[in-house]
Image (cartoon, grey):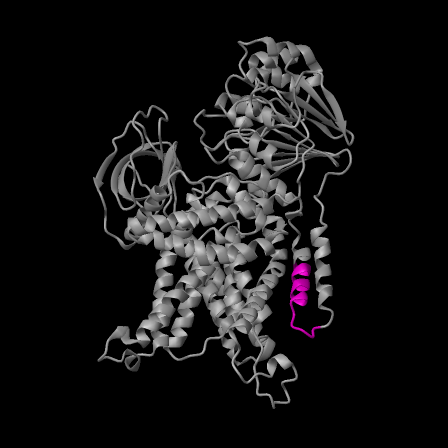
Amino acid sequence: MRSSILGFVGGAALLQQQAALPSHPLLLFLASAMLALLGAWRLRGACRVAANALCGLALGFCWAALVATHALAPGLAKADEGRDVVITGTIDNLPNRTSQFTRFNFAVESAEGMAVPPRIALSWYAGFRGAVEPVPVLQPGERWRLKVRLQRPHGNANPHGFDYELWLLEQGVRATGYVRAEGPHVRLAGFVVTPSNAVERMRSMLRERILRALEGRDYAGVIVALVVGDQRAIDQSDWQVFNRTGISHLVSISGLHITMIAGLVAWLAAGLWRRSFFLRRVQLPLLLPAQKIAALAGMLAALLYVLLAGFGIPAQRTLYMLCVVALALWTDRLASVTHVLALAACVVVLIDPWAVMWPGFWLSFGAVGVILYASVGRTAVYKNPGDPAAADPDLQRATPLTRRQRWLRGLRAAVTTQYAVTLGLVPLTLLLFAQVSLVSPLANAIAIPVVSLLVTPLALAGAVLPTSLGTPLLVLAHETMRWLAALLEWFSAVPLAVWTAPVPPWWLFALALVGTAWALAPRGWPARWLGLFTWLPLLALQPDAPAPGTLRVTAFDVGQGMAVLVETSGHRLLYDTGPSYGEEADAGGRVILPYLRARGIHRLDGLVVSHGDSDHSGGALSVLRDIGVPWLLSSLPPDHPAALAARAQRHCVAGQRWQWDGVRFEMLHPTAASYADAALKTNGRSCTLRIVAAGGTVLLPGDIEARQENELVAREGPRLRADILLVPHHGSGTSSTAPFLDAVQPSTAVFQVGYRNRYRHPKQEVVERYASRAVRIARSDEVGAITITVGQGVTIEEYRKTRPRYWY
């Protein structure tokens, strides 16, 4: 069975790598092959295991394809994008409220004049596009009539970035949009009774109660996350500390918390049942064993907690494992721990085939697998003193252990488990996150008991008890978390708190995985310490770089904004940092830094911010705060936050030059005199950078407009010639003039624009201007991140084309 389940999981993962969903004939063929493999039941040994795995692979592939086909079916027509429509339905999840907007999912019941998918994601902005009134307080389960504008699911597509389109597909969301300012917006019903709405309303009530009790306190968002699984109120600075110390898995409703709550409820239920709930005439254990009642109570408690958690993968895994154990106990069947783990994985993938695409799935099951591998079958067996097999004095005990011995034994088991998990997950953590927390063992040794045994029970009790009793418990939980966070912040500040390395290739990861299994093998296994040497290539891996004299330019897909990474063989420069996405998110934190970490890049040699518009400088603070940057070159005013945060800041001025690894850099604009012109717009002072390599030239002009283009043509003339042009001002109608294009004569034009952006960039007449000159056009909203290598020739990689997926 286990081999079949592993094959099933592998088949679902294989389907998620496909550029298109298989046709129905192929599905029938795979189903037929699966039935044929079922005839291999007479096989024995390795042949039978292989046949079962292949059968599971075919079944998993077919099942994931069928689920994906069903999920993709309800879509928004291309012609209906950008149209206003009045819809009626209910708020379908826990809304995310900030001072600027409220985001929520909406279950559509009816739409006027066009077909709308049954589940959509909406944003309701405050003071945006003519809105005067504030956004009303929305609650799950409310029925509303709203006027909205929709578009098909679309997200930024970058290497090592978050796949927003896949996440929407997994959530069943097939359109996104925003609520129009002019309305009509009418609340039709306060609550529509459904099981899902009841759960979400309960989560909302608990969240509001916690936030009221902890108003103004720094870690209220962490307490909310521990009770209802909503992590959106946790600050990014706190996440950075949790990630660097390796305890981010605790700041949620994790499997450990669910097991603890289920165990506590099971213990209470068993104790009360054994005492017959203090009834004198009824002996309940004679009717039903206390163990079965404990299993049932623990399972129900786990189910309730998982529903409050929002049904995350770690929570699902724990719930399904507890259900399998409870079922085995009720049916008087002994459950193997490996069978329990395999069945839990099967149920998770059966319900959600996309689960295999997220790190949480592999970390969750990987951690449990490591614990089982390092512990099952290695527990000491206590024998009678006369047993000749009991050579170890520790095994020669016929009397029960003392309380001190039990505590020491439990402490040793906890230390062994933490040691095994820390070592066992190193290769997987490097593969998924390109970093490993070196302070994680110590941080977890402190944080696990504090969060699991103190903060979480106090938070849960405080959330459900009456206000007079609950508020002091919530405050106590918060203060305990605040003390722990202060300690973790000190841990995270240690210079070697985190080891970073590039994401390894699959063969290097496989080698490290084998070595880790060798190192965690049972006692007596020869030279276990040698297994750790397989980590050396993994930990010593260096970022790849272009050959000497070669230039690599990566234009990120950041939406409506600019961000370009320029690399030579030994240096890296970031030109612009993309837009800000809100109060706590920007392109620096969401796009640029994850890419740099995955590449193993922890230092830049320079940063150029062309000008102060937020779509170019919005991510600068995140970059300057989280990665080493020796200098900033920009046209920003001295009091700009990015200028203040930089180690060294200078104005960009025409004539500045430097050379890295045979590649020449030259600033063409603005002139020094332009800084004295107070009437000049920030666009007109954009830092314009020319980069010349042996194989070609790249021109990065920022947001210059027609006036500055004419000045450049007059001043530089033929020197403006470039093979690659980052289109000025995202292709607006005020840039890309004919004289400028005739002077540059680009072979490739890169448009960094947002999908269906409100400025309608690029303008159609500008696109036609480039097309009429036979210029190859690459748009980030269509192809994702664009990587250009200038060496012997010019090669271009477009992310959505080199990594096609069926949901794009």
Q: Is residue 251 left or right of residue 688?
A: left
From the top left corner, tell me how far across and down residue 39 is, in percent: 50, 76
The quarter of the picture where residue 621 lies is top right
Residue 523's quadrant in the figure? bottom right
Magenta span main SS: helix
285 vs 712, nearest the viewer: 285
Q: Nearer the viewer, residue 506 or 83?
A: 506
Judge whether residue 521 is colored magenta. Answer: yes
Who's the residue at 64% across and 81% down the image?
393
Closer to the camera in the image, 434 or 559: 434
Position of 378 compared to 717: left or right?
A: left
Determine if residue 99 is in view: yes
Can you tell which quarter of the image residue 534 is in?
Answer: bottom right
Left or right? Give the position of 710 relative to 567. left
Q: Where residue 470 appears, x then y in whole percent?
A: 33, 51
Taking the image as drawn, is residue 64 in sight?
no
Residue 371: percent from left, percent from top: 56, 66
Q: 370 above or below 796? A: below
**How far across and down, in percent of the image, does residue 379 sit?**
57, 75
In percent of the image, x 65 and y 16: which residue is there?
669
Please tell me which residue is depicted at 42% across the width and 51% down the height of the picture. 226
| Pick the front one: 362 or 33 | 362
Q: Write the start and end of the magenta stretch as one range.
A: 510-525
At 24% across and 75% down in the image, what residue appears? 279
